[in-house]
Amino acid sequence: MIYFETSKKEKGLDFIDINIPSNQNQLEAYYKTRRDIFCLEQKLFKESDFDEYDHKAIPIIAVNHYLGAPDEVVGVVRIYEEVKGEWYGGRLGVDKSYRAFSKFICPNLFKERDVSALYQMSIAAGLIYRAVSLANYLGCQKFSAHVQEQNVKLFKRLHWNVIGELEQQGIKHFLMEAELDAYPATPIYTTPLPANNTLSLLDHVA
Ligand SMILES: CC(C)(COP(=O)(O)OP(=O)(O)OC[C@H]1O[C@@H](n2cnc3c(N)ncnc32)[C@H](O)[C@@H]1OP(=O)(O)O)[C@@H](O)C(=O)NCCC(=O)NCCS
């Protein structure tokens, strides 16, 4: 078991799926991953990073798969429409042990359900791609995010531009905007959560 835990990223990883949560456990893992990163690691929030945007945000997760079965949530991001056509992304985070990880297969990320090998992309890049291309599919005219300084370089590489500067949770952030042409409108393909979930994810499934 210990052997498996320490080496599973390198041995036997089938693929990483980047999608919306398909069951309650994945939704809980999404919030736990956010808490681990933004409360415990970065200490930007005390007990919870949940806020009013979570009532309308679409959660997106990266889930690793072994032997064809979903394993753990290893990355998260959320998107929401602030005013008609204007979308925001936020709470981008990747589990520590999966940072700077590439050379993985990511099915259904791009248009026409292509199974694409993201050999040059990280999990963060895949999450950003899913976030913006889904928002584009949902009628986004402008996609922005407040980006921590150390991550500006990552976003610039992915066709984002700096628009301004602001302070949030006491640290410097940059307001950045995605070039939408780099993120063609793409729906998501997944099994939705039951209709009684607080998020009407059914609306977004192709
Ligand atoms: C930002 C983050 C999502 C990037 O995820 P990722 O899948 O590792 O993305 P990448 O592999 O493309 O790495 C992005 C950058 O982080 C660096 N990085 C990744 N893992 C790292 C680690 N363990 N230690 C130091 N730097 C690391 C990469 O080298 C790269 O740097 P570069 O832009 O100078 O080349 C991840 O580092 C994270 O969750 N950080 C904590 C939360 C956070 O900062 N969220 C973003 C708020 S704007």
Image: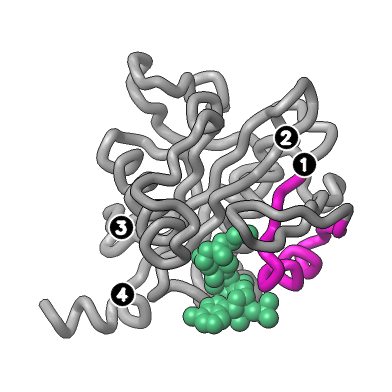
Viewport quadrant of the N terminus: bottom left
Amino acid type at circle 2 is: Trp
**Mark 3 sits on what residue?**
72
Label 2 lies in ligand 1 vicinity (Cβ under 8 Å)? no
Left or right of 7, for residue 144: right
Q: Which of marks 4 and 1 is nearer the N terminus?
A: 4
Q: Residues within 10 Å of mark 1 (few under 14, many from 20)?
A: many
Q: Which residue lies furthest to the top in this view?
A: 196
Residue 119 visible in the current orientation: no
Mark toward the start of the polypeptide (3 vs 4) = 4
Hey, which quadrant is residue 154 in on the image? Answer: bottom right
Label 2 sits on residue = 87
Which of the marked residues, 1 or 2, is nearer the chain's N terminus? Answer: 2
In the image, is residue 114 above or below residue 25?
A: below
Q: Nearer the viewer, residue 117 or 142?
A: 142
Q: What residue type is labelled 3?
A: Glu
Q: In this view, does 149 lie above or below 205?
A: below
Is residue 45 shown above or below 120?
A: above
Q: Which residue is drawn at 77% across and 58% down?
A: 174
Q: Which amino acid does label 4 sit on?
A: Gly
Question: Looking at the image, do the residues carrying marks 1 and 2 touch, with CB atoms under 8 Å apart?
Answer: yes
Q: How far apart are marks 1 and 2 (CA)?
A: 5 Å
Q: Earlier in the sequence, mark 3 or mark 2?
A: 3
Which residue in the structure is indicated by mark 4? 12
Q: Which of 41 and 123 is in front in this view?
A: 41
Q: Which span is picked out in magenta?
A: 144-162
CA gap, disc 3 to disc 4? 14 Å
Q: How many other residues sit within 10 Å of disc 3, few (<14), some (14-19) or many (≥20)? A: some
Q: State how far apart marks 4 and 1 are (Cα).
A: 36 Å
Q: Where residue 25 appears, x then y in whole percent?
A: 26, 41
Residue 19: x %, y % from top left: 49, 44
Task: Residue at 42% x, 63% y: name it.
Answer: 15
